Image (spheres, rainbow, N blue to C red):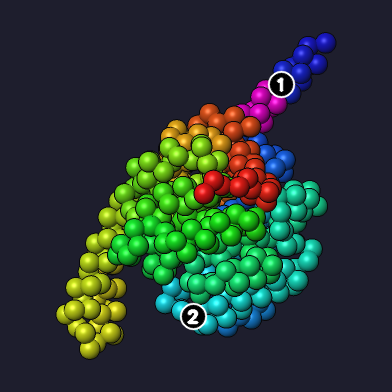
Amino acid sequence: MPHFRIAATGLATMLLALASAVSPQDDLLARARRLHAEVPLVDGHNDYPWQVRQQAGGDLAKLDISKPQPSLHTDLARLRAGGVGAQFWSVYVPSSYAGDRAVSATLEQIDLVHRMIERYPNDLELALTAGDIERIHREGKVASLIGVEGGHSIDGSLGVLRMLYRLGARYLTLTHGQNVPWADSATDARAHGGLTPFGREVVREMNRLGMLVDLSHVSPETMEDVLETTTAPVVFSHSSARALVDVPRNVPDAILKRLPANGGVVMVSFVPDFTSREMAAWAEAGARERARLAALFPKSPERVRRERAAWRQAHPAPGATLEQVADHIDHVRRVAGIDHVGLGSDFDGITTTPRGLPDVGAFPALTAELLRRGYSDEDVKKVIGLNVLRVMKRVTAPAPPRPD
């Protein structure tokens, strides 16, 4: 019966056509999403709480992430689309805040995160340990952690540090853009040559508490001093590789080579200036132009603003790409090893994002790129979350005493 053979041939052709319609990239994205379902993707840094403070005076209803927020990088729908399993919410306050002002503003930001978690109980839950993260991920919610961005937030007080930990803070970035009285920043003039004796006390107390020591923003000398002091693994919550983009905020190879002995993790950032050499050069040129205009028109900030806008129009930003972010992951993997790399986006703390990584919904695209580059499923799981979970488990375990 020839008509049956014709029908069968036609069906086979149709099935082949349908199969070919699924692109290799679609296959990689589907595989990426499966991996995100198997292990929690842990993002080391998101500044949504600061956006609420700046744009909405701390009123979560005005930047309600249960609804689309096109002016932000973050909302609940995109967190789910991105397969985000755990998010460190930054409770950043500017380095210019000092003393009681820094402490009170940090407490207000911690309060904001707690209120955010209470507002969305079906989507978010406070996590204090790696076990919490794993359980909350299995329950289909985003494990929400608190990271304090800058040692100025403790105002030189170990008591404040301890209370921040009790309120849920699980890392402290030792500095931000400026030095603190006990540690040097990467982006300020050298003052201490790394950590002071009190800075070493801070690190030891964080070890005792089970609090992650975050070395993003600190100078290489501070990094060295911390690695000599700490009894627990460190993290870089949002930094990239200095060998690829030579800016102070990135991690030198000499430090990457020390990470295997320490056990720590560099959570690669998505900050365009840290990701692309061209973007870093553009940002440096922009800073020089800003300084020139400020000196030229010291009494006319409006003129400076107009001239800066004209400069940016004449010199458009070259931007960065998802592939360049993956290059930094590759570099950290090559120098430090696959056990020492993670992800720390800095979403909602940056004004522009790499092409291909517009918001928190885009994490699977980066995971797919790693798969395309030949990373195994097990290696990808380490990058997206297992490495940070391992560090958290070690940090919260009793630390062995250091010899005097």
Query: Dot 1 corresponds to which residue?
Result: 12
Magenta span includes 19: yes
* Amino acid beneath label 1: Ala
Instruction: State left or right for residue 297 relative to residue 172.
Output: left
Q: Position of residue 323 (x, y in %)?
A: 44, 42
Residue at 37% x, 52% y is: 220
Cβ–Cβ under 8 Å for marks 1 and 2: no
User: Going 58% across and 60% down the picture, which residue do you hit?
Assistant: 205
Q: Taking the image as drawn, is residue 107 in sight? A: yes
Residue 339: percent from left, percent from top? 56, 36
Q: In the image, what residue occupies the spot 47% across and 64% down?
A: 198
Q: Main secondary structure of the magenta part?
A: helix
User: What secondary structure is marked by label 2?
Assistant: helix
**In the orientation shown, which residue stands out farthest toward the right?**
1
Q: Secondary structure at mark 1?
A: helix
Where 257 sits versus 95, above or below? above
Dot 1 crowding, Cα within 10 Å, few <14, some 14–19, many 20+ = few
Q: Which residues are magenta?
A: 13-21
Q: Is residue 52 highlighted in magenta?
A: no
Identify the residue shown where x is 49% and y is 50%: 229
Q: How many marks?
A: 2
Circle 2 sits on which residue? 99
In x, y percent, where is residue 363? Answer: 58, 49
Q: Is residue 239 above or below residue 19?
A: below
Q: Nearer the viewer, residue 79 or 183?
A: 183
Type of the residue with mark 2: Gly
State how far apart marks 1 and 2 are (Cα).
73 Å
**Where the N terminus falls, by quadrant?**
top right
- 190 left or right of 397 in image: left
